[in-house]
C-alpha cells in the first residue's frame, strides 16, 4: 500500500509539473513592453514553486514509502520535534516568499505607480452589457464632452457624445480599439452599467472597468497585428460573448486612421480588420 | 457550581457610577457645543471620535464592569475588536480614490416628491 | 478514573482546565463575544457611511430644533438608562431584588423614551421629505455646491439604516429587560448582569452614532432656515 | 479552591421522545450529525451542478432531455442557456463554500468532537447550538428555493457568482436575467447563514475556553481543538462584516438606496432615474462592496481549511504511531494563519480599481501568510519521518490532504503577486488554485475525518475496501480535473464563461476541457461509493470497540457511540499531551491522555506532557 501510494504521488507530481513545462499550453506570444519582465517574473516564480512543489511531494512519497509499518518493526521514533528545524524552515520560507513578493512588484509599479508618459495616445473605453465602445479624440486630440443623458442607442450614440460640443466634431467611436505600436497608450476606462474587465491576453494586462469611475491605465504595445479582446469580469448573461478586437497599427497607418471622419473611420477599420490576421495559436 | 468562583458582590459604588454618568453627560455637552464651533471637518471629526472613544471606554470600564474583570478577559476581548476595527480603515484610500476618479457629468436634480 | 487523591497534584492555574479561566460563567462570556461581533456589524455600517460620505457631497441639514435638541435628549435618556441599569445590577448583586427590579423598570422607561423621541424625530424628517433614496427638494437646492454638484441622497440611506438598526437593538433590549424584570426572582445575579452588558452595549453604540450621524451633520449656518 | 468542577450547565436526562432526541435535539452529538447530513445533502446538489456545468462547457448546445423537464426556464429544449449556466456557477460556489465547507468541518465534526476531546459533557449553550443548526438549515432551504422555485426564464436563479459583485447584484431585474427574486433570496440566505454561524462561533469559543476538564491545559489540547477554536474566532469576527454588507446590498435592491450603485448608470436602454422601474441612483461605490465581501471572504477560506488541517494533523499522528512533530509550532502556525488571514483580503481586488499602493501592501502580506502554511506542511512531513505508518483509509485521505494542499497552496504564491495577477486574475488558474486547496484539500480533510470518527459516531467501522477504492479514484481524479485548469488559465480561459467557442485563442483547449469533464463525471460518480459505504456501514459495518484505532485522545476513552453526557457522568481527568505514541518504556505504543503520570514522570517530568518544566 505504502509503495503504491508513493508511486501514485510521484506520477501525479510528474504529470502536474510536465503539463506546465511541455509548454504545449502556455501564454500566447506577448505584445507589450512590460510583458517581457512579467513573463520572466512568472517563469522565476513558477520554477521556485515548481521546485518546492516537487520537493514537498517527493518528500511525502519518500516518507510514505520508507516508513510504512512492517510486521517486524519496533516502534516509531519518539520525538516531539526540533526547534532548530522549525526556526530554519520558517526563516528560509519567509525569505523565499517575501523575496518573491518584492520581486513581484516591479512590473506592477511600472504600470500603476507612474502616470502615463506625456504624448501617449489616449482612448476612452466605455463598456456596457455586452459590448465595447471606444472613443477616439480625433486629430484635435481633445475628447468631446459625453453625458449619460445624451446616450441614444437608436442613433448609435452609445457613449452619449455631445454633438454640439466643438471638440466632439472630429471624435470617432467604434467597437474596435485601434492603437499605435511602440507608443504609450493611455486608456480611460469607464462603464455604463456594471463592472466589466478589459483584457487582451497578449498584453498581459487586465483592468476592471468600474461604473462611476474613470480609471486611467497605460501600457505600450510593441507588435502590430489584430488581437482578441475579452471581458474578464462577470457582467451578466452574455459575459462570454462580450468580445471585440484590438488593432495595433504602425504609427503612420494609425495617424492616417485617426485623421478620418467617423464614416470613413468605420469602413477603414473594417478594412484593417480584414487586413490583419489573428495570430495563429 | 462555579458561582463561588465569581465574587457575587459587584465592585463599584453607586456614587462612582453616578460620577461616571456625570462625566459622560458633560462630554456629550462638549460634543454638542463643538457642533457649533466652525472648524475644519477633519479636525472636528478627530476631536469627536476622541471624545466618543473616551466615553465608550468609560462605559465599558465601569458600567460594563470590564475594569473589574480579570486582565485576561480584557486582553481577550479588546485587542481583537480594536484590530478588526482598525483594519476597516484600510477602505479609506479607495473612498478618496473613487472620489478623485469619479466620472463627472451633469446630474439632473431628482424628481423628489414634494410636500 | 478521576480520583480526588490525584487531583491534588493538579496545578490549578487558570488555563490548565477544570476552572473558568476568566472566573466568568458561560453566559457572560458568550454575551461578551456576541457584543464583539455585533459591534463589528455596526463598525462595518459606520465605516460604509464614512466611506460614502468622504466621496460625496454631503448635506448638513440638522437644525438645532428639532434634530439636535431631540438627539441630545435621546442621548441623555440612554446615558441615564445605563446609570439606572448599573444600579439595578449592583442591587441584584446584593440580592436586593425589589430595588433591582425597580431600577430595571426605570431603565426600560428611559429606553422607551428614547424610542419614542427617536420615532418622532424620524417622523419630522420623513414629513420634511427625507427618504432612503432621496433628499427633500429644498435640501437639494440648499446644499448644491457652487460648481453644481448635488448633495448625496445617501444621506437618507445611511441615516435610516444605521439609526434604524440601532433602534432595533434598543427595542429588543427593552423586551429583554422586561423579561428579566419579570423573572428576576428565579434568575441568578449573573443573568441580570448579562442583560446589563447588552444594554450598555446599545448605549455604547449610540455614543458613536450620535456624534457621527447627528453632530457632524449640523446645519451650522442655518442655511435651510433661510 | 484549586480543585473546581464545572457548573452543571444542563445535566438533563437523555430525552426519550423521538422528536426531542433526533429532531430538536440539544445534544451536541446529534446536532453535529445533523450538520454533517446537511453538508452531505448540500454537496450532492453542488456536485450535480458542477457536472451540469462541465457538460455545458465541453458539449455546448447538446440536448439533455431531462433538463428540459427539470428546468424549463434554464434549459429550454434541454439545452442549457447562458443565464442558467451562470446561475449554476453561482449556486455551486455558494452552496459549496457556505453549506458544505462551513457546515461539515465546524458545525459537524467540531460540534460532535470538540466537547468530547476537551472532556466536557456538552456545548456551553445547547439551545443556541440547536438554533444555529436550524437557522443554517433555513438558509439552505432559502438558497435552494432561489434556483428551484424559479422556472420561467425571466426569473432564473441568481447570477452574480458567489461573490455577488455590485452593481450587477444590486441593480435588480433591469440588469438582466437572474437579477430578480433569485438574487434577493441569495442575499437573504447568506444573511441568515451569517447569523447561524455567529451563534455557532460564540458557542464554540465559550465551550473551549470554559469547559476544558481538569488537566486539559491549552497545550494539551488536540490540534483539532486548536483548529476549531481559531476557526470560530475567524467566524465571529468576519461574518458580522458580511452581514453588514448584506443588509446594505438588500436595501439597494429593495429600498432604492445606492450604497453600491454610482450615478449616471444607463442599463439595458434606460437611464437611471428616468423611469420608475429604474429609480435614480447616485454616489455609491462598487468597490465598497468588494471590500466588505472580501474582508469576510478571505477569512472564510481559512474557516474552510483550518478544521481540515486540524483533522489531518490528528490523523497523521495517530496512524504514523508517532507524536505530532513540532506541536507548539503547529499551534503557532494555526494562530498565525488565523491572524494574518485578516490582513490579506485585498489580494482578491488587485485588478478591481483599488488603490495600487494598498494592492502592493496586501501582496506582501499575502505571501507572508504562506510561511505558517509552509511550516505546517513541513511539520506534517516531520510527523511522517521515522513513523510506522498504518495505511487505513482515513490515513490515506490525510496524506492526500497534504499532497493536495501543497498543490493548491503553492499557486497562491503566484496569484499573490500583483504583477502576476494581471494575466491570472479571473482565469481558470484561479479556479485551479482554489479547487485544489479548498475544493478538494479541505474536502479530503472531511473525508479523513469521516472515515476516522465514523466508528465513534455509530459504533461500527466503515468498509475499508470501499473506502480505499473511493480514495484511489478520487485522489487521481481530482488531480486530473484541476491540474489542467492551471494551463487553461495560462492560455487565458476566463472564469464564468458559459462557452469558449467565441474565441479562437481558446480553441486549442477543447481537448483539455473535454478531458476534465469526463474525469469530473467519473469522480463525481465515485462519490456514491462513499455514500453507499456510509449508509451500509451504519447498519452492517463490523462492530467497533471504544478505541478501534489505538488512539490517545479523550473521545476514545468513552463508549462508541458515546453516552448522552459523553462520559457517563464522570468527567475524565487529563495527565498528558494529546499525541503520546511510541513512548519508550510504555507498555503499549500509545498512552491515553487519561493515563495517570507515573511516579518517574512526576518527579523528573520529561517535558513531553505538554507542560513546560
Ligand atoms: C481553503 C481555501 C483557500 C486557501 C487555504 C487559500 C490559500 C491561499 N490563497 Fe487563495 N483563494 C481561495 C481559497 C483559498 N486560498 C478561493 C476560494 C479563491 C477565489 C475566490 C474567487 O474569486 O472566487 C482564492 C483566490 C486567491 C487569490 C485571488 C486570485 C484572483 O482572483 O486574482 C489569491 C491572490 O493572492 C490567493 C492567494 C492565496 C495564498 C497566497 C494562499 C496561501 O495561504 C497558501 C499557502 C500554502 C502554501 C504556500 C503551500 C504549502 C507550502 C509549502 C509546500 C512550502 C514549500 C513552498 C515553498 C518553499 C515555495 N487566493
Ligand atoms: C468546496 C468547494 C468546492 C468544491 C468541492 C467544488 C467542486 C467542483 N467544482 Fe467548483 N467551484 C467552487 C467551489 C467548489 N467546487 C467555487 C467557490 C467556485 C466559484 C464560483 C464562482 O465563480 O462564483 C467554483 C466554480 C467551479 C467552476 C467554474 C465555473 C465557471 O467559472 O465558469 C467549475 C467548472 O468546471 C467547477 C467545477 C467543479 C467540479 C468538477 C467539482 C468537483 O470536484 C467534482 C468532484 C467532487 C468532489 C471530489 C467533492 C466530493 C465531496 C463530498 C462527497 C463531500 C463529503 C462530505 C463530507 C465528508 C461531510 N467549479
Ligand atoms: Cu462584460 Cu463580462
Ligand atoms: Cu484570499
Image (cartoon, coloured by chain):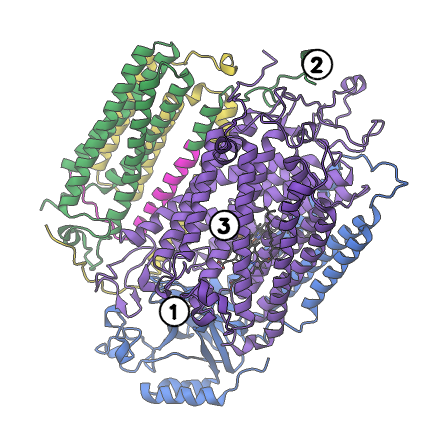
Q: Which chain is green?
A: C
Residue A140 in picture, x, y percent from top left: 32, 80
According to the image, label 3 marks what residue? D345
Asked which quadrant contains residue D281, the reply is: bottom left
Confirm if mark 3 falls within 8 A of ligand 4: yes
Relative placement, left or right, of C63 versus D372 is left
Pointer 2 chain = C
According to the image, label 2 marks what residue? C6
Q: Which residues are magenta?
A: C35-63
- Can you tell which mark lies on residue A188? 1
- Tell me if residue C43 is in the magenta stretch: yes
Q: Secondary structure at mark 2?
A: helix
Between circles 1 and 3, the one closer to the viewer is 3
> Would residue A103 be seen by someone viewing this image from the given angle?
no
Confirm if mark 2 falls within 8 A of ligand 2: no
Residue plotted at (64% across, 25% down): D216
Residue D564 in picture, x, y percent from top left: 58, 27
Please report contact status of discs 2 and 1: CB closer than 8 Å, yes or no: no
- Shade representing chain B: yellow
Ligand 2 sits in which quadrant? bottom right
Q: Secondary structure at mark 1?
A: strand
- Shade representing chain D: purple
Q: Is residue D316 above or below residue A263?
A: above
- Tell me if residue A118 is in the magenta stretch: no
Pointer 1 chain = A
Discs 3 and 2 lie in a common subunit? no
Q: Looking at the magenta stretch, what is its main secondary structure? A: helix
Amino acid at each position: 500500500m505504502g509503495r503504491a501510494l508513493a508511486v501514485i504521488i510521484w506520477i501525479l507530481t510528474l504529470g502536474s509539473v510536465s503539463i506546465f513545462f511541455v509548454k504545449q499550453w502556455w501564454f500566447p506570444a506577448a505584445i507589450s513592453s512590460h510583458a517581457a519582465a512579467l513573463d520572466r517574473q512568472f517563469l522565476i516564480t513558477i520554477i521556485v514553486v515548481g521546485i518546492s512543489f516537487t520537493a514537498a511531494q517527493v518528500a511525502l512519497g519518500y516518507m510514505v514509502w520508507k516508513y510504512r509499518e512492517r510486521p517486524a518493526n519496533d516502534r516509531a521514533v519518539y520525538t516531539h520535534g526540533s526547534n532548530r528545524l522549525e526556526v530554519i524552515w520558517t526563516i528560509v520560507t519567509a525569505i523565499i516568499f517575501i523575496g518573491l513578493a518584492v520581486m513581484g512588484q516591479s512590473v506592477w509599479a511600472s504600470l500603476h505607480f507612474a502616470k502615463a508618459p506625456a504624448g501617449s495616445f489616449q482612448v476612452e473605453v466605455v463598456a456596457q452589457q455586452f459590448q465595447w465602445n471606444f472613443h477616439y479624440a480625433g486629430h484635435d486630440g481633445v475628447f468631446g464632452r459625453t453625458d449619460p443623458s445624451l446616450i441614444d442607442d437608436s442613433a448609435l450614440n452609445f457613449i452619449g457624445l455631445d454633438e454640439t460640443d466643438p471638440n466632439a466634431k472630429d471624435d470617432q467611436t467604434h467597437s474596435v480599439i485601434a492603437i499605435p505600436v511602440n507608443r504609450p497608450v493611455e486608456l480611460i476606462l469607464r462603464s455604463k452599467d456594471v463592472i466589466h474587465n478589459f483584457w487582451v491576453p497578449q498584453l498581459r494586462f487586465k483592468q476592471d472597468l468600474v461604473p462611476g469611475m474613470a480609471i486611467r491605465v497605460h501600457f505600450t504595445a510593441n507588435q502590430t497585428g489584430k488581437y482578441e479582446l475579452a471581458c474578464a469580469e462577470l457582467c451578466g448573461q452574455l459575459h462570454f460573448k462580450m468580445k471585440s478586437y484590438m488593432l495595433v497599427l504602425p504609427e503612420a497607418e494609425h495617424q492616417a486612421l485617426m485623421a478620418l471622419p467617423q464614416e470613413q473611420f468605420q469602413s477603414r477599420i473594417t478594412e484593417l480588420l480584414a487586413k490583419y490576421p489573428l495570430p495563429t495559436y | 457550581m462555579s458561582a463561588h468562583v465569581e465574587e457575587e458582590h459587584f465592585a463599584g459604588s453607586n456614587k462612582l457610577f453616578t460620577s461616571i454618568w456625570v462625566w459622560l453627560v458633560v462630554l456629550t455637552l462638549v460634543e454638542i457645543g463643538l457642533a457649533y464651533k466652525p472648524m475644519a471637518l477633519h479636525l472636528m471629526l478627530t476631536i469627536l471620535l476622541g471624545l466618543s472613544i473616551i466615553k465608550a471606554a468609560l462605559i465599558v470600564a465601569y458600567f460594563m464592569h470590564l475594569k473589574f474583570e480579570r486582565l485576561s478577559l480584557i486582553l481577550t476581548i479588546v485587542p481583537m475588536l480594536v484590530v478588526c476595527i482598525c483594519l476597516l480603515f484600510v477602505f479609506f484610500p479607495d473612498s478618496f480614490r473613487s472620489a478623485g476618479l469619479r466620472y463627472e457629468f451633469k446630474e439632473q436634480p431628482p424628481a423628489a416628491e414634494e410636500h | 478514573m478521576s480520583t480526588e487523591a490525584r487531583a491534588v497534584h493538579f496545578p490549578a492555574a487558570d488555563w490548565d482546565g477544570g476552572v473558568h479561566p476568566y472566573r466568568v460563567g458561560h453566559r457572560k462570556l458568550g454575551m461578551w463575544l456576541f457584543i464583539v461581533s455585533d459591534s463589528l456589524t455596526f463598525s462595518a455600517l459606520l465605516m460604509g457611511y464614512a466611506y460614502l460620505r468622504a466621496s460625496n457631497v454631503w448635506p448638513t441639514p440638522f437644525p438645532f430644533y428639532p434634530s439636535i435638541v431631540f438627539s441630545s435628549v435621546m442621548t441623555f435618556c440612554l446615558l441615564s438608562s445605563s446609570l439606572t441599569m448599573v444600579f439595578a445590577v449592583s442591587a441584584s448583586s446584593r440580592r436586593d431584588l425589589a430595588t433591582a427590579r425597580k431600577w430595571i423598570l426605570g431603565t426600560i422607561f428611559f429606553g422607551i423614551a428614547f424610542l419614542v423621541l427617536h420615532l418622532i424625530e424620524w417622523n419630522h424628517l420623513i414629513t420634511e421629505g427625507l427618504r432612503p433614496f432621496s433628499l427633500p427638494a429644498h435640501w437639494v437646492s440648499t446644499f448644491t455646491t457652487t460648481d453644481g454638484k448635488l448633495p448625496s441622497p445617501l444621506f437618507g440611506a445611511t441615516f435610516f439604516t444605521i439609526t434604524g438598526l440601532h433602534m432595533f437593538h434598543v427595542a429588543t433590549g427593552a423586551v429583554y429587560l422586561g423579561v428579566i424584570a419579570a423573572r428576576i426572582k428565579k434568575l441568578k445575579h449573573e443573568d441580570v448582569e448579562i442583560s446589563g452588558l447588552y444594554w450598555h452595549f446599545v448605549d455604547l453604540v449610540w455614543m458613536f452614532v450620535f456624534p457621527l450621524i447627528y453632530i457632524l451633520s449640523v446645519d451650522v449656518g442655518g442655511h435651510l432656515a433661510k | 479552591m484549586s480543585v473546581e468542577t464545572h457548573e452543571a450547565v444542563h445535566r438533563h436526562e437523555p430525552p426519550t421522545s423521538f422528536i426531542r432526541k433526533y429532531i430538536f435535539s440539544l445534544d451536541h452529538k446529534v446536532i453535529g450529525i445533523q450538520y454533517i447530513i446537511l453538508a452531505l445533502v448540500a454537496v450532492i446538489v453542488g456536485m450535480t451542478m458542477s457536472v451540469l456545468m462541465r457538460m455545458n462547457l465541453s458539449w455546448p448546445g447538446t440536448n439533455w432531455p431531462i433538463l428540459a423537464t427539470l428546468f424549463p426556464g434554464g434549459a429550454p429544449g434541454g439545452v442549457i442557456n447562458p443565464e442558467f449556466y451562470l446561475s449554476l456557477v453561482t449556486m455551486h460556489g455558494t452552496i459549496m463554500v457556505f453549506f458544505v465547507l462551513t457546515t461539515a468541518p465546524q458545525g459537524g465534526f467540531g460540534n460532535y468532537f470538540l466537547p468530547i476531546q476537551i472532556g466536557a459533557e456538552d456545548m456551553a449553550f445547547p439551545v443556541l447550538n440547536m438554533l444555529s443548526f436550524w437557522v443554517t438549515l433555513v438558509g439552505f432551504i432559502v438558497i435552494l428555493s432561489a434556483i428551484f422555485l424559479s422556472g420561467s426564464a425571466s426569473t432564473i436563479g441568481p447570477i452574480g457568482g458567489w461573490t455577488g459583485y455590485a452593481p450587477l447584484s444590486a441593480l435588480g431585474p433591469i440588469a438582466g436575467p437572474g437579477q430578480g427574486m433569485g438574487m434577493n433570496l441569495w442575499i437573504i440566505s447568506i444573511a441568515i447563514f451569517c447569523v447561524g454561524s455567529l451563534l455557532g462561533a460564540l458557542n464554540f469559543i465559550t465551550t473551549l475556553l470554559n469547559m476544558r476538564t481538569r488537566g486539559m491545559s491549552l497545550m494539551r489540547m488536540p490540534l483539532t481543538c486548536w483548529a476549531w477554536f481559531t476557526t470560530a474566532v475567524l467566524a465571529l469576527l468576519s461574518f458580522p462584516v458580511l452581514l453588514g454588507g448584506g443588509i446594505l446590498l438588500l436595501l439597494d435592491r429593495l429600498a432604492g438606496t445606492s450604497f453600491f450603485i454610482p450615478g449616471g448608470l444607463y442599463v439595458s436602454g434606460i437611464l437611471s432615474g428616468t423611469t420608475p422601474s429604474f429609480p435614480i441612483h447616485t454616489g455609491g461605490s462598487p468597490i465598497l462592496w468588494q471590500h466588505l465581501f472580501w474582508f469576510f471572504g478571505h477569512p472564510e477560506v481559512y474557516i474552510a481549511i483550518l478544521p481540515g488541517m486540524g483533522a489531518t494533523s490528528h490523523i497523521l499522528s495517530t496512524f504514523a504511531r508517532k507524536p505530532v512533530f513540532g506541536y507548539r509550532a503547529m499551534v503557532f502556525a494555526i494562530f498565525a494563519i488565523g491572524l494574518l488571514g485578516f490582513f490579506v483580503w485585498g489580494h482578491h481586488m488587485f485588478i478591481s480599481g483599488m488603490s495600487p499602493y494598498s494592492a502592493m501592501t496586501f501582496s506582501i502580506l499575502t505571501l507572508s501568510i504562506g510561511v505558517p502554511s509552509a511550516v505546517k506542511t513541513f511539520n506534517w512531513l516531520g510527523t511522517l519521518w521515522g513513523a510506522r505508518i498504518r495505511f487505513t483509509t482515513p490515513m490515506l485521505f490525510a496524506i492526500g490532504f497534504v499532497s493536495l494542499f501543497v498543490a493548491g497552496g503553492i499557486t497562491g504564491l503566484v496569484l499573490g503577486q500583483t504583477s502576476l495577477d494581471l494575466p491570472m486574475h479571473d482565469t481558470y488558474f484561479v479556479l485551479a488554485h482554489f479547487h485544489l486547496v479548498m475544493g478538494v484539500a479541505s474536502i479530503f480533510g472531511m473525508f479523513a475525518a469521516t472515515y476516522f470518527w465514523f466508528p465513534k459516531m455509530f459504533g461500527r467501522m466503515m468498509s475499508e475496501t470501499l473506502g480505499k477504492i473511493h480514495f484511489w479514484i478520487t485522489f487521481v481524479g481530482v488531480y486530473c480535473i484541476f491540474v489542467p485548469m492551471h494551463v487553461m488559465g495560462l492560455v487565458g480561459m476566463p472564469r464564468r464563461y458559459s462557452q469558449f467557442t467565441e474565441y479562437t485563442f481558446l480553441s486549442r483547449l477543447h481537448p483539455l476541457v473535454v478531458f476534465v469533464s469526463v474525469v469530473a463525471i467519473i469522480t463525481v460518480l465515485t462519490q456514491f461509493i462513499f455514500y453507499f459505504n456510509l449508509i451500509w456501514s451504519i447498519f452492517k459495518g463490523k462492530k467497533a470497540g471504544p478505541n478501534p484505532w489505538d488512539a490517545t485522545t479523550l473521545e476514545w476513552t468513552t463508549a462508541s457511540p458515546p453516552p448522552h453526557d459523553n462520559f457517563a457522568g464522570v468527567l475524565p481527568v487529563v495527565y498528558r499531551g494529546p499525541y503520546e505514541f511510541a513512548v519508550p518504556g510504555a507498555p503499549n505504543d500509545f498512552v491515553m491522555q487519561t493515563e495517570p503520570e507515573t511516579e518517574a514522570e512526576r518527579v523528573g517530568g520529561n517535558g513531553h506532557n505538554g507542560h513546560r518544566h
